[in-house]
């Protein structure tokens, strides 16, 4: 499953992304622009993944800005 969404205006170290992929669980993996992240918090219309400094410095995620479109993908089951 693949979808696209826009980033809200939030701190990139704890970026919230609209929940548009159906069922997610805490601890589930999700790919954001090809970078695999772990879902830590699920809210009514969003989920959060914590990004450690190493992930930011070694990936394209450090260049993202608020309102930028990102590619979201769930792992194959």
Image (spheres, grey):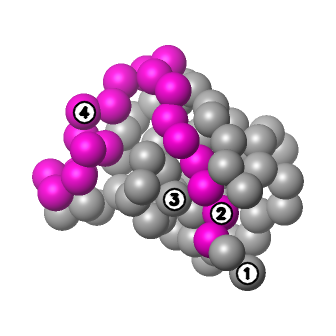
At label 2, counting other C-alpha atoms closer than 10 Å, the crowd grade (few under 14, some 14-19, many 20 or more) is some
Q: Is residue 43 visible?
A: no
Position of 52 relative to 11 (above/below):
below
Q: Residue at x 72, y 56 (%)?
A: 1
SS under mark 3? strand
Position of 70 relative to 33 (above/below):
above
**Of pointers 1 and 3, the one earlier in the residue sequence:** 3
Q: Disc 3 marks which residue?
A: 31
Q: Which of these two is toward me, 73 or 22?
A: 73
Q: Kindly check if marks 1 and 2 are in contact, taking CB atoms under 8 A apart as contact.
A: yes
SS under mark 4? helix
Q: Which residues are magenta?
A: 56-75
**Of pointers 4 and 3, the one earlier in the residue sequence:** 3
User: x, y (%) of residue 64?
Assistant: 33, 31
22 falls in the magenta region: no
SS under mark 1? loop
Residue 63, label in figure: 4
**Of pointers 4 and 2, the one earlier in the residue sequence:** 4
Q: Nearer the viewer, mark 4 or mark 1?
A: 1
Q: Is residue 31 visible?
A: yes
Q: Disc 2 marks which residue?
A: 74
Identity of the residue furthest to the bottom in this view: 77
Q: Disc 1 marks which residue?
A: 77
Q: Kindly check if marks 4 and 3 are in contact, taking CB atoms under 8 A apart as contact.
A: no
Q: Residue at x 65, y 63 (%)?
A: 74
User: How far is disc 4 from disc 3 in space, using C-alphas?
Assistant: 16 Å
User: x, y (%) of residue 68?
Assistant: 46, 22
At label 1, counting other C-alpha atoms closer than 10 Å, the crowd grade (few under 14, some 14-19, many 20 or more) is few
User: x, y (%) of residue 58?
Assistant: 16, 57
Identity of the residue furthest to the top in this view: 67
């Amino acid at each position: 499953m693949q979808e696209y969404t826009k980033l809200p205006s939030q701190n990139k170290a704890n970026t919230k992304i609209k929940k548009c992929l159906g069922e997610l669980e805490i601890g589930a993996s999700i790919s954001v622009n090809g970078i695999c992240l772990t879902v830590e918090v699920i809210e009514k219309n969003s989920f959060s993944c914590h990004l450690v400094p190493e992930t930011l410095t070694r990936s394209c995620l450090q260049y993202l800005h608020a309102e930028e479109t990102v590619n979201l993908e769930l792992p194959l089951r």
